[in-house]
Image (spheres, helix red, strand yellow):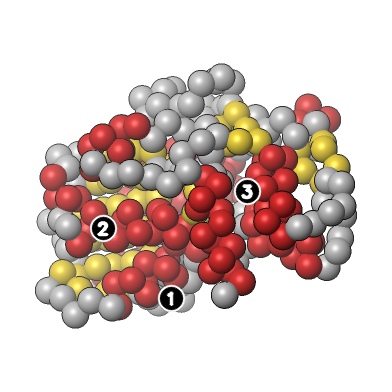
Amino acid sequence: MTKILLLGSTGQLGSILTQLFLQLSNFNISNPTSSECDLSSEKSIINYLYNKKFDILINCAAFTNVDLAEEKVKLSNIINSLSLKFLCDNLNQDCSILHISTDYVFDGNNNVPYLETDFCRPLSQYGKSKHEGEKILNLYNRRILVVRTAGLYSYKGHNFLTKIVSKIKNNESISVIRNQYTSTTSALDLSNFIYQIIISKKIYSLEKKLNIFHYVNDGNISWFKFALEICKIYEYKKKIEALDYSRYKFIAKRPQYSVLNNSKLKNYFNVSINNFDNSLKNCIYKFEK
């Protein structure tokens, strides 16, 4: 029986992973609520982990409100970075860790897709806190897989897709930055990848150290063009207003170019990854089913 601790089980990734693992009789999944295992409290983490043993921790939990993180600096630091120290210090030593990170660790000054080895220079408090979390994980002699992703969306929760679909259905005007480029990632696809490398035991092929990989759907696109793709599927006829990155007043600054190169992950795990347009259509089908 493989014992999994899943943190962030109500989010985009966590909710799908919970459904996937609950189907298997040879996996025991523990998915505590944020009150049962509060990542902002060392005492709560210690109390929850006391006398428990797990084979794998999947950490999908994070302080993800990028703008609010500028105001809640201490809280975002604790949840996104310091909590990883508390977890590593109190988990059984043979527990492997799969941790989700972000494209926001980069400054966006590249003009080619970012590699895992490229220098990190986050622009926002959110990005800084996630990068600090990666640095903390690097201190531990454990099997640790950090999966950086970008432009994550699903058919539920608060994300770019659900915001645009809501505007379409309410016949509201839509405005999107035309020259901010990213990779987009379907939570369905990323969840399935995580699920597959765990049930196939490929995760155990990794060395006992920090292993960083990028998972995003193939193809890169501007947020404006991604919005156009969504509107095209829904046959939304209104013109979308194109905003300029340099003139947009961000609360927290975002990288203008945060496309991630996923070749290392595809080669190491021998997996194929869907193109962004196919994944978008699949997700919308789920959304409307």
Q: Residues within 10 Å of mark 3 (few under 14, many from 20)?
A: some
Q: Are marks 1 and 2 in contact (CB under 8 Å)?
A: no
Which quarter of the image is occupied by the N terminus? bottom left
Which residue matches tag 3?
A: 66
Q: Are marks 2 and 3 in contact (CB under 8 Å)?
A: no
Q: Residue 48 placed where, x, y %?
A: 31, 73
Instruction: Between residue 90 and residue 148, name the one nearer to us.
Output: 148
Residue at image x 46%, y 27%?
Answer: 114
Instruction: Between residue 24 and residue 235, name the one nearer to us.
Output: 235
Instruction: Between residue 81 and residue 65, name the one nearer to us.
Output: 65
Label 3 is placed on what type of residue? Val
Looking at the rendered structure, the secondary structure element under dot 1 is loop
Residue at image x 17%, y 42%?
Answer: 206
Figure quadrant of residue 8: bottom left
Q: Are marks 1 and 3 in contact (CB under 8 Å)?
A: no
Residue at image x 59%, y 62%?
Answer: 284
Relative to 49, is 234 above or below?
above
Please tell me the numbered disc located at residue 33. 1
Real-space CA distance between mark 1 and mark 2, rounded to the nearest whole angstrom: 24 Å
Residue at image x 72%, y 40%?
Answer: 224
Along the polypeptide, which appears first: circle 2 or circle 3? 3
Label 1 is placed on what type of residue? Thr
Q: Residue 237 placed where, x, y %?
A: 84, 54
Real-space CA distance between mark 2 and mark 3, rounded to the nearest whole angstrom: 30 Å
The answer, for residue 87, to whether it is visible in the render is no
